[in-house]
Image (cartoon, helix red, strand yellow):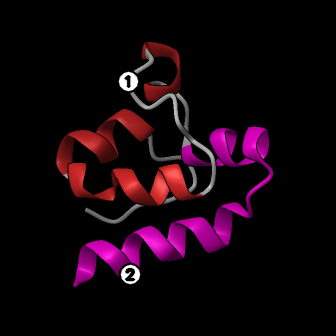
Amino acid sequence: MTIKKDTIIGEILDNHPETEPIFIEIGMHCLTCPCSRMETVEQACEVHGADADEFVKKLNDFISK
């Protein structure tokens, strides 16, 4: 799976639950909330003041290891 800015958070967590701590690091604590699971990475980054490009890179680097 390659994560992009338009990837849905729930899809990432379903396929790679080990990424949860990365989301929590930038303040995304509502990962079990149905609304947050339907957001794209870019939408969530906007709300939490994170750079979406950097976050996508971090997630992809993590899951590629």
Image height of 28 relative to 63, above or below: above
Is 58 displayed left or right of 62 in the figure? right
Tell me the residue at 67%/61% (across/down).
52
The percent coordinates of residue 63 (x first, y second) are: 27, 72
The front one of 35 and 21 is: 21
10 Å crowding of disc 1: few (<14), some (14-19), many (20+): few
The percent coordinates of residue 35 (x first, y second) are: 52, 16
Tell me the residue at 51%/28% (across/down).
30
Residue 47's quadrant in the figure? top right
Q: Secondary structure at mark 2?
A: helix
**Residue 46 magenta:** yes
Is 21 displayed left or right of 51 in the figure? left
Name the residue type under label 2.
Asp
Q: Which residue is mark 2?
A: 61
Name the residue type under label 1.
Thr
The percent coordinates of residue 33 (x first, y second) are: 45, 18
Residue 62's quadrant in the figure? bottom left
3D distance between C-alphas at marks 1 and 2: 23 Å
Is 44 displayed left or right of 37 in the figure? right
Q: Which mark is residue 32?
A: 1
**Residue 21 magenta:** no
